[in-house]
Amino acid sequence: MTNISSFEQKSNSISLAKIKDAPFTIIGVAESNYEEGTGDQRTSTKGVKITTKEKFEGFNVLHTTRTAIVSKLLDPTVLKSLENGTIGPVKCESAVSASGKNYFKLVDA
């Protein structure tokens, strides 16, 4: 007999939101979309997993679907830069766009 607990997925990352404004050094970025729903109701949100030099709650991988951060980190120039080294330290900050919309971005720490 198989226990249902054997099918539980273990996470290898924590949410960027959990570390609040703690500084971190980026050593890698991978696309990691967030899927939810089933069948015709299934939706996908673009996301990334960020590998860091530092550990947070025992993990050195952060995940986020924050649009401005995902867009910035998947930019080819950022990915190319990571091939040659690290980026940071950086931290996540709340910002307001010219249209008045709140969003999150990475800034130098």
Image (cartoon, grey):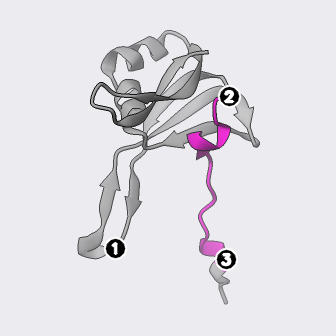
Badge 2 or badge 1: first in the primary sequence: 2
Residue 7 shown in magenta: yes
Q: Split into 4 quadrants, where in the image is the N terminus?
A: bottom right
Question: Which x, y percent locates residue 52?
Answer: 62, 28
The residue identified by callout 1 is 38
The residue identified by callout 3 is 5
The residue identified by callout 2 is 22
Q: Helix or strand or loop: what does disc 1 sit on?
A: loop
Q: Residues within 10 Å of mark 1 (few under 14, many from 20)?
A: few
Q: Helix or strand or loop: what does disc 2 sit on?
A: loop
User: What residue type is disc 1 on?
Assistant: Thr
Instruction: Report the front residue among 21 and 87.
Output: 21
Instruction: Give the spatial CA distance, label 2 vs label 3.
Output: 33 Å
Q: Helix or strand or loop: what does disc 3 sit on?
A: helix
Question: Which x, y percent locates residue 22?
Answer: 68, 28
The residue shown at (49%, 42%) is: 64
Badge 1 or badge 3: first in the primary sequence: 3
Q: Residues within 10 Å of mark 2 (few under 14, many from 20)?
A: some
What number is the disc on residue 102? none
Quarter-of-image position of residue 38: bottom left
* Stretch in magenta: 5-21
Question: Which x, y percent locates residue 6?
Answer: 65, 74
Instruction: Report the front residue among 67 and 86.
Output: 67
Q: Split into 4 quadrants, where in the image is the C terminus?
A: top right
The reply to whether the C-beta atoms of the residues labelled 1 and 3 are less than 8 Å apart is no
The reply to whether the C-beta atoms of the residues labelled 2 and 1 are less than 8 Å apart is no
The residue shown at (67%, 83%) is: 3
Instruction: Report the front residue among 58 and 91.
Output: 91
The residue shown at (39%, 59%) is: 35
Which marked residue is nearer to the observer: mark 2 or mark 1?
2
Badge 2 or badge 3: first in the primary sequence: 3
